[in-house]
Image: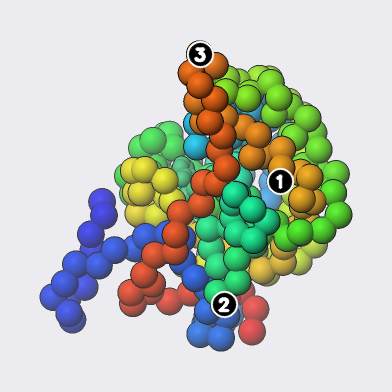
Amino acid sequence: MGLHYSHHKHCLTHHQSPININTRTAKYNPSLKPLKFSYDPKTAKRIVNVGHCFNVEFEDICDKSVLSEGPLDGHYRLCQFHFHWGSSDRDGSEHNIDGHLYPAELHIVHWNSKKYTSFAEAAKHPDGVAVVGVFLKLGNTNPALQSIIENLDKVKTKGKACPFTEFHLNGLLPEDLNYWTYMGSLTTKPYFECVTWIILQEAITVSSQQLEQFRRLQCTSENENPSFILENHRPVQPLDHRVVYSSCP
Ligand SMILES: NS(=O)(=O)c1c(F)cccc1F
Ligand SMILES: [Zn+2]
């Protein structure tokens, strides 16, 4: 994985993420279908502090919660979602829209359960992973985030986990499900180029106070001197010769 050979330039190119999405050069693709989210709230399992962020993990031993249609062939099984944020409300998202940064970005992570048997295996293939990105814009307190935020004090330090069941993930999706899509990578180590990115064009809201709660998470374990996850967003990467497609004109 990693380098792709593009013959016409006899060079090796990267397909890394995140990127800046130029909405004017994104290409409308009429063959893109509407996204189909089929999430079962019972598959929510736990919240884990993984050091650079927290993951809300779902049971992924069978196709109970899947993403299908959109730009995808087959169905991709939900395995976790997490957020990226900044040290202030001025930045935090990983993808940019026409150079505009949002204060945070939600990533809903799925893997191709038609072809592979685990996320780890799927992450080694270009069609292995599908991540839905949802921007968070500053606004009123988002009630759908409250049930997550009120559990963060239980996973304050790196490695801590707490049970988290019965979560309605649809509550974190905006009304309008139009999207941009492009081929890219994981935005943290090992940066595998295995992701079909699906970035929703409409943002959901988050309040400044809710973002403050994210920044109180610690990247250190409980027996170390505390330091905080103040920000965890990767800088944008070169687009090279990739095209970003849009589901609407
Ligand atoms: N941020 S991201 O969504 O690309 C991502 C994943 F999907 C999975 C693991 C690590 C990671 F960074
Ligand atoms: Zn992410």
Say which label, 3 or 2, has the lower sequence index.
2
Give the CA distance from mark 3 to mark 1. 25 Å
**Residue, disc 1:** 211
Q: Is residue 123 left or right of residue 92?
A: left
Residue 51: give its label. none
Q: Furthest residue to the front?
A: 225
Say which label, 3 or 1, has the lower sequence index.
1
Image quadrant where one finds the C terminus: bottom right
On whether ligand 1 comes within 8 Å of the CB at mark 3, the answer is no
Residue depicted at x 55% and y 74%: 99
Give the CA distance from mark 3 to mark 2. 43 Å
Q: Position of residue 181 (x, y in %)?
A: 52, 67
Give the CA distance from mark 1 to mark 2. 23 Å
Q: Position of residue 168 (x, y in %)?
A: 77, 39
The type of residue carrying mark 2 is: Asp
Q: Is residue 5 left or right of residue 214?
A: left
**Label 2: element kind:** loop
Q: Position of residue 78 (x, y in %)?
A: 58, 41
Q: Furthest residue to the top?
A: 223
**Residue, disc 3:** 223
The type of residue carrying mark 1 is: Leu
Residue depicted at x 57% and y 77%: 98
Residue depicted at x 63% and y 23%: 155
Say which label, 1 or 2, has the lower sequence index.
2
**Label 1: element kind:** helix
**Residue, disc 2:** 98
